[in-house]
Image (spheres, rainbow, N blue to C red):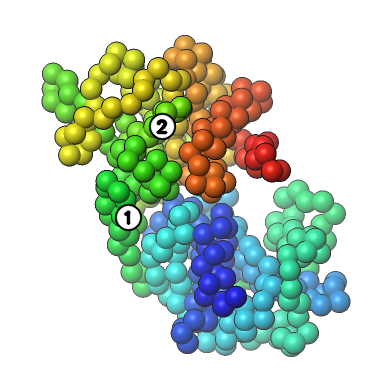
């Protein structure tokens, strides 16, 4: 498999990671991260590159990572193991050049911005640590590689929990990301052709378009972006996204935290409070949408055409946020979700875009699987009473745990 093809597949398949590559004689670092983290990096939140070498093995393994300070106290760490010769060759060339191109990719694997990264540290010491390329490991993603990568993560942050980790050699490089160019992304669907830019001040609208595109192929002609209904004050939006099929209705409200619109950095407590406020608002909007469905209100697409669908189905109501922060007290939100499901008789899931994309990727192109996964997820939420669920889809029966 050619390097370009391999990286393209990994960009689509991985939730988030970092790649060092040389394509068409251009040295590049590619970063796939949550859209909010991409925005923070563009807004100059700061980041550092980390290189590790596991010398405990017969064939030493090179690991690389990027720590992005989208939050000063709780930065995002993305890491990966180098299993191909061309990765290490590109890494050495980039370190010798002391700068290279950088490409930022969102959860969809869509390029949202390009720029430049410049190293402000002594890269020669890292080159010496890496040593001879011929002596390094290359091969499959074995248990040995997994354990080594866990140990790389542990060496960076020993507060994280891993099974039998050990310390490896590593060096941290101070670097500057700059000269950003924002990419116009055009999404072509059967009925809608939205366009987005990562620097769009309407940050919530960007997220809803990404969500719409991620499931547009599942529902073909039965998915609508910002469907409307008429009331005494004119046209009003039903929800951000409406999708359906014979056995399921999906109502999605998207809520993104503002990054570019911020005049100063918020503390984590304020970020959590703002996020919870958005979630409560989204829940109320979804309740209103289900009430309009029950009372037989007529809905219309962007062209003014009437939308027809079966209404006697328990709907999936989804609050989809750009990032579900794992900090703060979420007990009141969890109680509200349970109360809403009981009183409104709906399935209600609150999750972030990264987790939603994992569910979508495991549908195998079948909307029935998305329906099934969301019902399972609701059951797990009721069982554990924890909003910070993470999916694990296993086995031939696609069981969600």
Foreground residue among 166 and 383: 383
- Vertical position of residue 373 compared to residue 323: above or below: above
> In the image shown, does 235 or 42 lie closer to the viewer?
235
What residue is drawn where x is 29% and y is 13%?
295
Q: Is residue 40 visible?
A: no
Task: Tell me if residue 160 can be seen.
Answer: yes
> Seen in the image, is 288 located left or right of residue 10?
left
Relative horizontal placement of residue 294, taking residue 215 as reference (left or right)? left
Q: Position of residue 364 (x, y in %)?
A: 54, 47
- Vertical relation: 330 (above or below) 136: above
Q: CA distance from mark 1 to mark 2?
A: 22 Å
Dot 2, how many residues are within 10 Å of its Cα: few (below 14), some (14-19), or many (20+)?
Answer: some
Residue 245's tag is 2
Give the quadrant of residue 219: top left
**Element carrying mark 2:** strand
Left or right: 42 in relation to 362 = left
Label 1: few (<14), some or many (≥20) within 10 Å? some
| Residue at x 60% of width, y 75% of height | 1
Q: Earlier in the sequence, mark 1 or mark 2?
A: 1
Tell whether 329 sits left or right of 254.
Answer: right
In the image, residue 185 above or below residue 320: below
Residue 284 in the image: state x and y as whole percent. 37, 22
Location of residue 108 in the rendering, given as x and y in whole percent from the top left corner: 45, 55
- For residue 187, which numbered disc appears in the image? 1
């Amino acid at each position: 498999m050619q390097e370009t093809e391999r990286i393209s597949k990994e960009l689509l398949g991985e939730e988030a990671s970092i790649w060092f590559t040389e394509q068409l004689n251009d040295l590049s670092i590619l970063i796939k991260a949550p859209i909010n983290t991409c925005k923070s990096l563009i807004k100059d939140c700061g980041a550092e590159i980390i290189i590790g070498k596991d010398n405990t093995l017969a064939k030493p393994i090179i690991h690389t990572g990027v720590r992005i300070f989208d939050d000063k106290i709780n930065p995002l760490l993305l890491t990966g193991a180098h299993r191909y010769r061309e990765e290490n060759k590109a890494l050495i060339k980039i370190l010798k050049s002391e700068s290279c191109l950088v490409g930022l990719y969102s959860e969809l694997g869509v390029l949202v911005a390009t720029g430049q990264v410049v190293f402000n540290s002594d890269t020669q010491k890292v080159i010496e640590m890496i040593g001879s390329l011929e002596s390094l490991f290359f091969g499959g993603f074995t248990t040995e590689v997994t354990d080594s990568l866990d140990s790389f993560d542990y060496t960076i942050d020993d507060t994280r929990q891993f099974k039998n980790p050990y310390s490896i050699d590593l060096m941290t490089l101070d670097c500057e990301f700059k000269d950003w160019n924002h990419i116009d992304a055009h999404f072509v669907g059967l009925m809608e052709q939205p366009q987005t830019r990562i620097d769009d001040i309407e940050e919530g609208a960007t997220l809803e378009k990404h969500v719409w595109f991620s499931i547009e192929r599942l529902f073909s002609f039965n998915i609508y972006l910002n469907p409307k209904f008429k009331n005494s004050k004119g046209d009003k939006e039903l929800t951000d996204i409406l999708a359906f099929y014979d056995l399921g209705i999906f109502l999605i409200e998207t809520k993104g935290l503002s990054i570019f619109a911020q005049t100063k950095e918020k503390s984590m407590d304020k970020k959590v409070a703002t996020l919870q406020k958005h979630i409560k608002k989204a829940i109320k909007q979804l309740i209103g949408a289900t009430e309009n469905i029950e009372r037989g209100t007529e809905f219309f697409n962007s062209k003014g055409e009437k939308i027809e669908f079966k209404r006697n189905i328990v709907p999936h109501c989804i609050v989809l946020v750009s990032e579900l922060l794992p900090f703060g007290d979420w007990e009141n939100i969890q109680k509200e979700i349970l109360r809403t499901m009981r009183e409104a008789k709906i399935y209600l899931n609150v999750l972030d875009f990264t987790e939603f994309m994992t569910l979508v990727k495991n549908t195998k192109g079948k909307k029935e699987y998305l329906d099934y996964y969301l019902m399972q997820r609701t059951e797990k939420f009721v069982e554990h009473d924890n909003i910070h669920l993470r999916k694990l889809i296993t086995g031939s029966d696609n069981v969600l745990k």
